[in-house]
Amino acid sequence: MRYRAHIVASVLIILAMAGIAAAALAQLPPGTRLPTHWGIDGRPDRYAGAAFALFGPVALTAFVSLLMAALPAIEPLQDRMEASAPLYRTAWSGVLAMMVFAQSMVVAAALGVALPGGIVLAAVGVFFIVLGNALPKSRPGFFVGIRTPWTLTDPENWIATHRYAARVMIAGGAALILLTVVPIDDGARASLRIATILMVATTPVIYSYLLWRRARRSPMRRG
């Protein structure tokens, strides 16, 4: 089994998260509400009961882990899935780390520890950088990578798009980290964060389409 280590790690992490959640919950008085979501400004903007807030990340981690464990078995293009294994492992590890971080934020609030709000977006930035470094290590498939009509039908488009997306994701991740520490107006910080995330999410798709258009107009492609 190619992903046995990740499956074992997922089970251990889920059990540890559940134990921490139970221990934290036991320390809280009835009716305690804890943050479950942080806005683009890094401040909590959504709250829930303590049990839901603490065990929500546990349930989500279990669901995502089951999904990640199942997808390789149902990928029709098994040889390409194997070629994309480095990216898949990186994404799985990154998601687990983000889930642990999310629960840590909730547990910190439960214990009365005030963590800097911007740390949430900084963590997303680190995730972007790690994932961006792995993006070029993939090949066309149905479940891994940037799947557009143009990348899925043209391996050259796939490779070029993922190389571009890697650069954008790394730059976007670095920008999110810098925006956590640069002393600027909060409104400007939030706007720049939104612009950065939109750039990372949309420009690779646009780039893929433009490559496809250029290829259609190429004399070699027409021949």
Image (cartoon, rainbow, N blue to C red):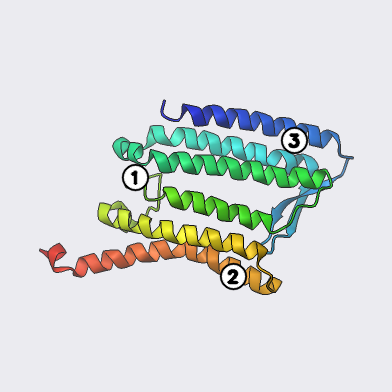
Please report contact status of discs 3 and 1: CB closer than 8 Å, yes or no.
no
Coordinates of residue 12 in the picture (x, y in percent): 61, 28
Q: Which of 191 and 73 is in front in this view?
A: 191
Residue pictured at 70% horizontal, 32% vertical: 18
Image label count: 3
Which sits earlier in the primary sequence, circle 2 or circle 3? Answer: 3
Quadrant assignment for the C terminus:
bottom left
- Residue 53 position by quadrant: top right
- Where, quadrant-wise, is the N terminus in this rendering? top left
Three-letter residue code for mark 2? Leu
Question: The disc labelled 3 sits on which kind of residue?
Answer: Ala
Q: Mark 2 points at which residue?
A: 192
Local SS, label 3: helix
Residue 144 visible (yes or no): yes
Residue 28: numbered disc: none
**Where is mark 1, residue-wise?**
141
Q: Where is residue 19 in the image (x, y as percent from the top left)?
A: 73, 30
- Residue under circle 3? 21
| Badge 1 amino acid | Gly
